[in-house]
Each structure stands twice: as structure tokens, then as C-alpha cells.
Image: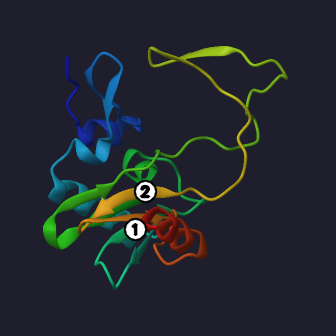
Amino acid sequence: YVRLWDLETDLQQQTSPIIVTGENQRVHPARAMPFANLYEAVMSRVEAGLVERTLDEETGLEIFNYYPSSPPDPITDICRGLILHSSSMTVVATPFVRFSSDGDDGDDGDEQPHQMSGVSGHFMMKMDGALGIGFLWAGKAWVATRRRLSSEQARWATEWLRT
């Protein structure tokens, strides 16, 4: 069964869509909609001051990251290091969508299995660190952080992958 992306409905309901393509297989929302619609929606969040856009001059890649103060909505939520290449209309990398980090991690000291959207798993305390987004572009391996390809962590990880 396939649930198609319905941007207008999801925005009105303020839900974060998950596209189900088969048993426990998911498609990131950014890959489930036409590129032109995605780019227009993301750029409207940039213009509204909800999402930061960073252009990497060397590659032409654009990295989109929501501001912590941005209210949740389906488009803003997918801008957590979302990497697009607008001139080729390519969704390059789709990291995790926004999740709650309000300090209530539900950790009562006893790891418990949880059920989330039909997928069972074990959830533990969130730890701080840098998000590394690995992807292939122009025949090379790259790593970006949520905001740029040129950060110290991204440069180190890219070099490490390539050697």
C-alpha cells in the first residue's frame, strides 16, 4: 500500500508525513514529492525566516536547516540537513526529520521496547554530537553537517572517507 504525499492536507493538519512503500520500508518525504514542489516549499520557509539555506560554492549544493525556534510543520521538519542541487533538480541527501529534544527522553533507567508506526525498537537517551550526513555526489563521497560541507567535522569526515 502506498500513501501519497498530500502537501496541502498535511500542512493543514500539521502532521509530519511518512510514505509507506511496503512492509517496514519508508521513503523520506523529500523524495516522495516532485522536486519543483519541494524546492518551492523549502524556499518559502527560507524566505519566512524559518529555515537557513547554505550554498556550497564548490559543489553548488544547498543545505537547508531549520532554526531551533521554528514551529514544527512538515516542510520545516525535513530541513534538518536536507541537501538539494537545484540546477539538476536532485534531492542529494535526506537525513532524519526533526524530533523532540525537549529534555523529556522518557528514560526511566530501564530500556524498554517501544512501538512506533509499526516498527519495534529500543530507544535510549539522546546524546549530543555532530550529525554527519554521508552521500555520494559527482562520483565522490562527501560528509556534511546539518549546516555545511565546510565545517571542521564535515571536512575531517570527508577526508577520512576518501582515504
Query: Considering the numbered disc 1 on the image, is that residue within a helix, a strand or a loop?
Result: strand
From what the image shows, is residue 116 above or below residue 72?
above
Q: Which of the pair 39/132 is nearer the observer?
A: 132
Q: Residue at x 41, y 39 (%)?
A: 14
Q: Mark 2 or mark 1, which is nearer the start of the sequence?
A: 1
Q: Residues within 10 Å of mark 2 (few under 14, many from 20)?
A: some
Q: Residue at x 81, y 18 (%)?
A: 110
Q: Residue 17 location, x and y as percent?
A: 35, 34
Q: Residue 40 location, x and y as percent?
A: 23, 62
Direction from residue 97 to residue 121 in the image, left or right? right
From what the image shows, is residue 57 above or below residue 115?
below
Q: Which of the pair 55/40 is nearer the observer?
A: 55
Query: Considering the numbered disc 2 on the image, is that residue within a helix, a strand or a loop?
Result: strand
Q: Residue 49 location, x and y as percent?
A: 46, 70
Direction from residue 73 to residue 109 in the image, left or right? right
From what the image shows, is residue 49 above or below residue 4?
below
When asked about the image quadrant of residue 85, the answer is: bottom left
Furthest-front residue in this view: 163
Quarter of the image where the N terminus is located: top left
Q: Which residue is mark 1?
A: 63
Q: Residues within 10 Å of mark 1 (few under 14, many from 20)?
A: many
The total number of labels drawn is 2
Direction from residue 130 to residue 109 in the image, left or right? right
Report the amino acid beneath label 2.
Gly
Q: Of circles 1 and 2, which is in front?
A: 2
Report the amino acid beneath label 1.
Ile
What label sits on residue 134 in the rendered view? Answer: 2
What label sits on residue 156 in the rendered view? Answer: none
